[in-house]
Image (spheres, rainbow, N blue to C red):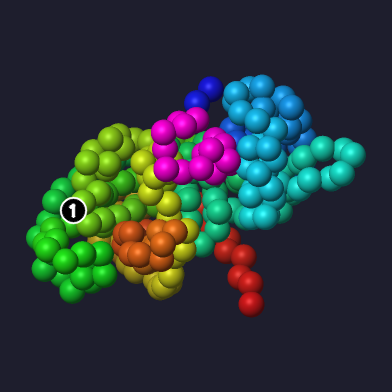
Amino acid sequence: MKTLRPDSPLPLYKQLSLLLWEEIQCSYPAGSRIPSEAELAAAYHVSIVTVRKAVALLAERGLLEVIRGKGTFVFPDAPDAEFSGYLDFSSYCRRLGKKPSSRTLDLQVLDAEDPRYRFLLREGERQVVELTRLRLADGVPVIWEVSCFSERHLPVLRQLGDGSLYQLLYRNDIHPVLARKRFSIRLANSVLAEGLDVPLGKSLLYISDKVYDESKSPLHLNEMYVVSDRFDIIFDLAK
Protein backbone atom coordinates (compact mmCIF):
# COMPACT_ATOMS: atom_id res chain seq x y z
CA MET A 1 0.00 0.00 0.00
CA LYS A 2 1.30 3.45 -0.92
CA THR A 3 2.07 5.79 1.96
CA LEU A 4 1.38 9.46 2.56
CA ARG A 5 4.14 12.06 2.61
CA PRO A 6 3.99 14.37 5.66
CA ASP A 7 6.71 16.55 4.09
CA SER A 8 4.64 17.22 0.95
CA PRO A 9 3.07 20.67 0.48
CA LEU A 10 -0.11 18.83 -0.54
CA PRO A 11 -2.32 18.40 2.58
CA LEU A 12 -2.62 14.86 3.92
CA TYR A 13 -6.33 14.63 3.21
CA LYS A 14 -5.76 15.52 -0.45
CA GLN A 15 -2.98 12.95 -0.71
CA LEU A 16 -5.30 10.41 0.87
CA SER A 17 -8.14 11.24 -1.51
CA LEU A 18 -5.86 10.46 -4.47
CA LEU A 19 -4.67 7.17 -2.96
CA LEU A 20 -8.22 6.18 -2.04
CA TRP A 21 -9.54 6.83 -5.52
CA GLU A 22 -6.68 4.87 -7.08
CA GLU A 23 -7.44 1.93 -4.74
CA ILE A 24 -11.19 2.19 -5.37
CA GLN A 25 -10.75 2.00 -9.14
CA CYS A 26 -8.72 -1.19 -8.80
CA SER A 27 -10.74 -2.96 -6.10
CA TYR A 28 -14.26 -1.56 -5.69
CA PRO A 29 -16.86 -1.64 -8.48
CA ALA A 30 -19.56 1.01 -8.82
CA GLY A 31 -22.17 0.71 -6.07
CA SER A 32 -19.93 -1.23 -3.67
CA ARG A 33 -19.21 -0.20 -0.09
CA ILE A 34 -15.70 0.93 0.81
CA PRO A 35 -14.07 0.34 4.23
CA SER A 36 -15.22 2.37 7.22
CA GLU A 37 -13.51 5.56 8.36
CA ALA A 38 -11.89 3.67 11.25
CA GLU A 39 -10.59 0.96 8.92
CA LEU A 40 -9.17 3.51 6.49
CA ALA A 41 -7.57 5.47 9.32
CA ALA A 42 -5.85 2.32 10.57
CA ALA A 43 -4.78 1.24 7.07
CA TYR A 44 -3.23 4.60 6.16
CA HIS A 45 -2.04 5.57 9.67
CA VAL A 46 -3.95 8.83 9.74
CA SER A 47 -6.64 10.37 11.93
CA ILE A 48 -10.37 9.91 11.47
CA VAL A 49 -10.58 13.63 10.70
CA THR A 50 -8.14 13.22 7.77
CA VAL A 51 -10.14 10.28 6.42
CA ARG A 52 -13.40 12.19 6.79
CA LYS A 53 -12.02 15.17 4.84
CA ALA A 54 -10.64 12.91 2.09
CA VAL A 55 -13.94 11.07 1.72
CA ALA A 56 -15.86 14.37 1.73
CA LEU A 57 -13.64 15.64 -1.09
CA LEU A 58 -14.36 12.56 -3.19
CA ALA A 59 -18.06 12.85 -2.41
CA GLU A 60 -18.08 16.52 -3.49
CA ARG A 61 -16.62 15.45 -6.82
CA GLY A 62 -19.33 12.88 -7.38
CA LEU A 63 -17.09 9.84 -6.89
CA LEU A 64 -18.40 8.56 -3.54
CA GLU A 65 -21.78 8.64 -1.84
CA VAL A 66 -22.04 8.77 1.97
CA ILE A 67 -25.27 7.24 3.32
CA ARG A 68 -25.79 7.93 7.00
CA GLY A 69 -26.04 4.72 9.01
CA LYS A 70 -25.03 2.52 6.07
CA GLY A 71 -21.56 3.57 4.97
CA THR A 72 -19.74 5.06 2.00
CA PHE A 73 -20.31 3.71 -1.50
CA VAL A 74 -18.72 4.12 -4.91
CA PHE A 75 -21.16 6.33 -6.73
CA PRO A 76 -22.87 4.37 -9.55
CA ASP A 77 -22.59 7.26 -12.00
CA ALA A 78 -19.21 8.59 -10.95
CA PRO A 79 -17.61 10.93 -13.51
CA ASP A 80 -15.48 9.09 -16.04
CA ALA A 81 -12.69 11.63 -15.94
CA GLU A 82 -10.91 11.58 -12.61
CA PHE A 83 -11.80 14.80 -10.78
CA SER A 84 -13.46 15.99 -14.04
CA GLY A 85 -12.39 18.63 -16.52
CA TYR A 86 -9.83 16.53 -18.35
CA LEU A 87 -9.73 12.96 -19.56
CA ASP A 88 -7.61 10.70 -17.37
CA PHE A 89 -7.36 7.63 -19.60
CA SER A 90 -6.39 5.16 -16.85
CA SER A 91 -9.31 6.13 -14.61
CA TYR A 92 -11.77 6.22 -17.51
CA CYS A 93 -10.67 2.84 -18.78
CA ARG A 94 -11.15 1.17 -15.40
CA ARG A 95 -14.64 2.69 -15.12
CA LEU A 96 -15.45 0.91 -18.39
CA GLY A 97 -14.17 -2.39 -17.00
CA LYS A 98 -11.12 -2.39 -19.26
CA LYS A 99 -7.46 -2.75 -18.36
CA PRO A 100 -5.49 0.40 -19.29
CA SER A 101 -1.89 0.37 -20.42
CA SER A 102 0.45 2.78 -22.17
CA ARG A 103 3.60 2.69 -24.25
CA THR A 104 5.86 5.72 -24.20
CA LEU A 105 7.06 6.07 -27.77
CA ASP A 106 9.11 9.27 -27.58
CA LEU A 107 10.18 12.01 -25.18
CA GLN A 108 12.01 14.90 -26.82
CA VAL A 109 12.95 18.50 -26.13
CA LEU A 110 12.01 20.93 -28.91
CA ASP A 111 12.61 24.60 -29.58
CA ALA A 112 9.31 26.40 -28.96
CA GLU A 113 8.98 27.86 -32.46
CA ASP A 114 5.36 26.82 -32.98
CA PRO A 115 3.06 29.68 -31.84
CA ARG A 116 0.90 27.15 -29.96
CA TYR A 117 3.70 26.63 -27.45
CA ARG A 118 3.56 30.23 -26.22
CA PHE A 119 0.65 29.12 -24.05
CA LEU A 120 3.07 27.02 -21.98
CA LEU A 121 6.11 29.25 -21.61
CA ARG A 122 7.13 31.46 -18.74
CA GLU A 123 9.53 34.35 -19.17
CA GLY A 124 12.95 33.11 -20.26
CA GLU A 125 11.74 29.65 -21.36
CA ARG A 126 12.43 28.70 -24.97
CA GLN A 127 11.88 24.95 -25.16
CA VAL A 128 9.07 22.44 -24.67
CA VAL A 129 9.01 18.73 -23.92
CA GLU A 130 6.94 16.58 -26.28
CA LEU A 131 5.73 13.23 -24.97
CA THR A 132 4.23 10.73 -27.42
CA ARG A 133 2.35 7.71 -26.11
CA LEU A 134 0.17 4.88 -27.39
CA ARG A 135 -2.81 4.15 -25.11
CA LEU A 136 -4.27 0.66 -25.02
CA ALA A 137 -7.47 -0.81 -23.58
CA ASP A 138 -7.29 -4.56 -22.88
CA GLY A 139 -4.13 -4.59 -24.99
CA VAL A 140 -5.79 -3.02 -28.06
CA PRO A 141 -4.44 0.36 -29.30
CA VAL A 142 -7.18 2.99 -29.03
CA ILE A 143 -5.50 6.40 -28.66
CA TRP A 144 -2.38 8.05 -30.06
CA GLU A 145 -1.53 10.87 -27.67
CA VAL A 146 0.93 13.76 -27.88
CA SER A 147 1.44 15.93 -24.78
CA CYS A 148 3.57 19.09 -24.65
CA PHE A 149 4.92 20.62 -21.45
CA SER A 150 7.25 23.48 -20.65
CA GLU A 151 10.92 22.50 -20.34
CA ARG A 152 10.70 22.99 -16.55
CA HIS A 153 8.73 19.72 -16.30
CA LEU A 154 11.39 17.58 -18.02
CA PRO A 155 12.85 16.09 -14.76
CA VAL A 156 9.39 14.86 -13.77
CA LEU A 157 8.51 13.49 -17.21
CA ARG A 158 11.74 11.47 -17.31
CA GLN A 159 10.32 9.41 -14.42
CA LEU A 160 7.24 8.32 -16.38
CA GLY A 161 8.11 5.09 -18.13
CA ASP A 162 4.84 3.41 -19.17
CA GLY A 163 2.86 4.43 -16.06
CA SER A 164 0.05 6.92 -15.50
CA LEU A 165 1.04 10.48 -16.39
CA TYR A 166 -1.47 12.13 -14.06
CA GLN A 167 -0.56 9.92 -11.11
CA LEU A 168 3.07 10.92 -11.70
CA LEU A 169 2.09 14.59 -11.76
CA TYR A 170 0.13 14.23 -8.52
CA ARG A 171 3.06 12.53 -6.80
CA ASN A 172 5.16 15.56 -7.73
CA ASP A 173 2.53 18.02 -6.43
CA ILE A 174 1.41 19.07 -9.91
CA HIS A 175 -2.38 19.11 -10.10
CA PRO A 176 -4.29 19.35 -13.38
CA VAL A 177 -7.80 20.56 -12.66
CA LEU A 178 -9.26 22.09 -15.83
CA ALA A 179 -9.13 21.51 -19.57
CA ARG A 180 -10.54 23.36 -22.54
CA LYS A 181 -11.31 20.93 -25.33
CA ARG A 182 -11.78 21.08 -29.06
CA PHE A 183 -13.12 18.22 -31.16
CA SER A 184 -12.80 17.43 -34.84
CA ILE A 185 -12.23 14.55 -37.23
CA ARG A 186 -8.77 13.82 -38.64
CA LEU A 187 -7.66 11.20 -41.15
CA ALA A 188 -4.97 8.72 -40.18
CA ASN A 189 -1.62 9.44 -41.81
CA SER A 190 0.99 6.73 -42.22
CA VAL A 191 2.39 7.16 -38.67
CA LEU A 192 -1.04 7.02 -37.03
CA ALA A 193 -2.19 4.15 -39.23
CA GLU A 194 0.80 2.02 -38.29
CA GLY A 195 0.74 2.94 -34.61
CA LEU A 196 -2.99 2.42 -34.12
CA ASP A 197 -3.19 -0.52 -36.54
CA VAL A 198 -5.86 1.10 -38.70
CA PRO A 199 -6.14 1.65 -42.47
CA LEU A 200 -4.45 4.69 -43.95
CA GLY A 201 -6.97 7.52 -44.20
CA LYS A 202 -9.31 6.14 -41.51
CA SER A 203 -11.39 8.79 -39.72
CA LEU A 204 -10.22 9.37 -36.15
CA LEU A 205 -11.78 11.47 -33.39
CA TYR A 206 -9.33 14.29 -32.66
CA ILE A 207 -9.43 15.93 -29.21
CA SER A 208 -7.13 18.80 -28.34
CA ASP A 209 -6.81 20.11 -24.78
CA LYS A 210 -5.34 23.12 -23.07
CA VAL A 211 -4.83 21.88 -19.52
CA TYR A 212 -4.44 24.15 -16.48
CA ASP A 213 -3.22 23.49 -12.96
CA GLU A 214 -5.00 24.32 -9.69
CA SER A 215 -3.71 27.90 -9.79
CA LYS A 216 -5.25 28.22 -13.29
CA SER A 217 -1.79 28.48 -14.84
CA PRO A 218 -1.13 26.67 -18.17
CA LEU A 219 0.19 23.15 -17.56
CA HIS A 220 0.27 21.32 -20.89
CA LEU A 221 -1.17 20.91 -24.36
CA ASN A 222 -2.63 17.58 -25.32
CA GLU A 223 -3.68 15.98 -28.61
CA MET A 224 -5.47 12.65 -28.85
CA TYR A 225 -6.35 10.65 -31.95
CA VAL A 226 -9.05 8.19 -30.91
CA VAL A 227 -10.17 5.04 -32.74
CA SER A 228 -13.78 5.72 -31.85
CA ASP A 229 -15.18 2.40 -33.10
CA ARG A 230 -12.95 0.64 -30.57
CA PHE A 231 -13.28 3.02 -27.63
CA ASP A 232 -16.20 5.20 -26.58
CA ILE A 233 -15.53 8.53 -24.87
CA ILE A 234 -18.44 10.04 -22.98
CA PHE A 235 -18.45 13.52 -21.48
CA ASP A 236 -21.07 14.77 -19.06
CA LEU A 237 -21.93 18.34 -19.98
CA ALA A 238 -23.38 20.61 -17.33
CA LYS A 239 -24.91 24.02 -17.93
Report x, y in % for residue 119: 26, 70
- For label 1, the SS is helix
The front one of 202 and 173 is 173
196 lies above or below 208: above
Report x, y in % for residue 26: 59, 33
Report x, y in % for residue 228: 48, 59
Q: Give the side of residue 103 with respect to residue 73, left or right.
A: left
Q: Give the side of residue 159 with respect to residue 65, left or right.
A: left
Q: Is residue 227 visible?
A: no
Residue type at the position of mark 1: Glu
Identified at 55% across, 54% down, the residue is: 83
The quarter of the picture where the C terminus appears is bottom right
3 lies above or below 145: above
Residue furthest right as drawn: 69
The front one of 217 and 65 is 217
According to the image, label 1 marks what residue?
151
How crowded pointer 1 is (Cα within 10 Å; few <14, some 14-19, many 20+) is rated as many
Identified at 34% across, 45% down, the residue is: 134
Q: Which residues are magenta?
A: 4-19
Magenta-colored stretch includes residue 164 = no
Magenta-colored stretch includes residue 11 = yes
